[in-house]
Image (cartoon, rainbow, N blue to C red):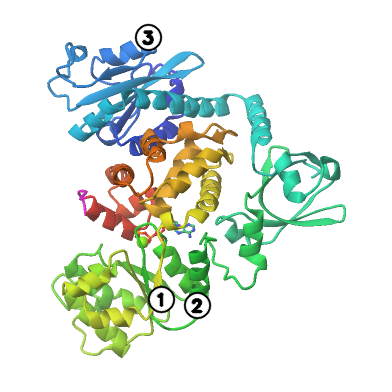
Amino acid sequence: MIPSTTPSVLMQIQSKIQKFAVMLSSVLQLEVEIVDNALFRVAGTGVFGKQLGQRLNTNSKLLRYIIETKKDRVVTHSRIDPLCKDCSNKDKCEEKAFLGTPVIYHDQCVGVISLVALTYEQQQHINANIQEFSDYVRHVSSLFVSRFLQDQNSGDNIQKIFLTMIDNMDQGVLVAGNDRRVTFANQAALKIMGINPGNVVGKTLHFQPLTFEDNFRHGHMQHIITFDDRKELIIGQLHAVQDQWLFLMAFHQSHSSADFSSNQEEPQIEAMIGECRPMKQLKKLISRVAPGPSSVMIVGESGTGKEVVARAIHKLSDRRAKPFIPINCAAIPEQLLESELFGYVKGAFTGASANGKIGLIQAANTGTLFLDEIGDMPLTLQAKLLRAIESREIQPVGASHPVPVDIRVISATNQKIEQGIAAGKFREDLYYRLNVIPLRLPPLRERQEDIELLIHYFLHLHTRRLELVYPGVAQDVIDFLKRYRWPGNIRELSNLMEYLVNVVPSGEVIDMSLLPPNLLGSHEVAEEVPPRSAAAEAIQEASVTALEGMERQMIRDALSRYSNKKQAADELGIGIATLYRKIKKYELAGA
Ligand SMILES: Nc1ncnc2c1ncn2[C@@H]1O[C@H](COP(=O)(O)OP(=O)(O)OP(=O)(O)O)[C@@H](O)[C@H]1O
Ligand SMILES: [Mg+2]
């Protein structure tokens, strides 16, 4: 028999630690390796993502030193550094710089998080920020680890966390017993309901959800809360927690009740969050044009929600019960795009399937065809597409007769298509056909008013998905994020919130200390210089690259884990179409 050994504390929460490593690596733009105090590799990104759960096969004097002394260790120029002198792996080592930080739990070093530079840029990056990185990693890792270990080890702690959380929350919370009698209402809840504790504590509550279960995933569920003869329409989530009920009120009561249900003038578009003027106008426009047959072209930067809008239009149209077929024109190789779009008949060409194939345009018959990245469609196909739209019929490859089709075309692009027209890469006549109703999605930096709302929306979404406790957010974090330029738009905000709900301790507040130093760096300087100066522009540039770097790394990691791109896209929470475009943009292998 193999003797059984208890896994180390980090190994017990290995999958969580791995996720943490991936997120940390993307926000810091460095490779991450996490080992436990017996030098088993618990987690890693890139080349360090292999052989998880196995003991390292180097002599790792460096790591042992960190574990024994609980001190950071940095190697700024590997190989020539004296610390590397006796390393058995020295000749093969690809590491350019290394920063190891102990993970402390109950005063013990339970492992080491290493930030590793494999490129010259990363090396510079570590060298320029040694102390910031080290402090930051120490801080977030101890929070992260202790949260999961405490969650595992003790029920008492959960109750404590629970109460602290409620005490500190800016969010309205009602706690009720099994019998639905209120045991506690925090200040925020009292304020939202406009009552004193005496009006509610001890009263029996009735919760009546207003929306369908299906909508629950997309945001706060509205409830009518009744007690005595009072009726309150409050947006929030009802959670059964052991033998108690917890009603977590949404932060944005007024917004939400006005715009998600009672206001009949506003279109009800699920999962399209935005209350700023341009978004309100856009929603109105969408609801006006959705029922019609006209072609819509959506233009907006990456991550602004083009696909969300396309789906909303389809949902609000008479075609909602019919197929919505998205095609990414940039993702499909030119030689395949024609048969994908138009289909082919049997024997059309060598290698064609014996039964022929229905094209995506035909598959969208009576429904909506969503042509994403339309600017990347090759010229030859543009001619064919134009013919199909004008004549309402398509000619499958090798077919002798055209097939009639009834489709609504929505296209999207993040480039200025006019430039493509000027350069002779895009047909002007097709452009006019597709652009009957132009919709422009504003970048997030022009939607400052929406940022707070979106922060809470995504916190809600990710806490629910990950079954974590809804955290508070410090005001200075909100102020900072409002000023940030969000080159990756809503997707980037969503990614950051997902990361933050993972690192914030249960029931606590997301404060500035949790924001990645890359972002904070740009903030500190930005406050001292007037906006729009050359320096401010340079800073904005820097944060653009920082976040793009983060995105690139996340994508690269997902691609290394999955050979199937759909799975990789699912894990990243992006559409397959976007994945392909990003692969191209970041010149990642495997496009
Ligand atoms: N108004 C919104 N409210 C809530 N979530 C949104 C909103 N707009 C976009 N999102 C979310 O942001 C992410 C990006 O949206 P989407 O994929 O539609 O952007 P896109 O413009 O098509 O991006 P790309 O150009 O990269 O393809 C998705 O997770 C989406 O659910
Ligand atoms: Mg898209």
Provide the secondary structure element on which disc 1 rests: strand
Query: Which residue corresponds to mark 2?
Result: 317
Asked if the residue at tag 2 contacts the one at tag 1, i.e. Cβ–Cβ closer than 8 Å, the answer is yes
Query: Which residue corresponds to mark 1?
Result: 368
Query: Which of the two residues, 403 or 130, is positioned nearer the viewer here?
Result: 130
> Where is ligand 1, by quadrant?
bottom left
The Cα atoms of the two marked residues, 3 and 2, are separated by 65 Å
Q: Which amino acid does label 2 sit on?
A: Ser
State the extent of the magenta-drawn residues as a range: 587-591
Residue 300 locus on image (x, y percent): 36, 64
Q: Which of marks 1 and 2 is nearer the N terminus?
A: 2
Q: Look at the image and say whether residue 590 sits in the magenta stretch.
A: yes
Residue at horizontal 47 percent and vertical 39 percent from the top = 500
Provide the secondary structure element on which disc 2 rests: loop
Residue 377 visible in this rendered orientation of the protein: no
Residue 20 locus on image (x, y percent): 41, 34
Q: Indicate whether 258 appears above or below 478.
A: below
Task: Work out which quarter of the rendered image holds the N terminus and state it.
Answer: top left
Q: Which amino acid does label 1 sit on?
A: Thr
Q: Which of marks 3 and 2 is nearer the N terminus?
A: 3
Q: Earlier in the sequence, mark 1 or mark 3?
A: 3
Q: Look at the image and say whether residue 260 sits in the magenta stretch.
A: no
**How many C-alpha atoms fall within 10 Å of the one at disc 1: few (<14), some, or many (≥20)?**
many
The Cα atoms of the two marked residues, 1 and 3, are separated by 63 Å
Label ID, residue 329: none
Label ID, residue 69: 3
Is the stretch drawn in magenta largely helix, strand or loop?
loop
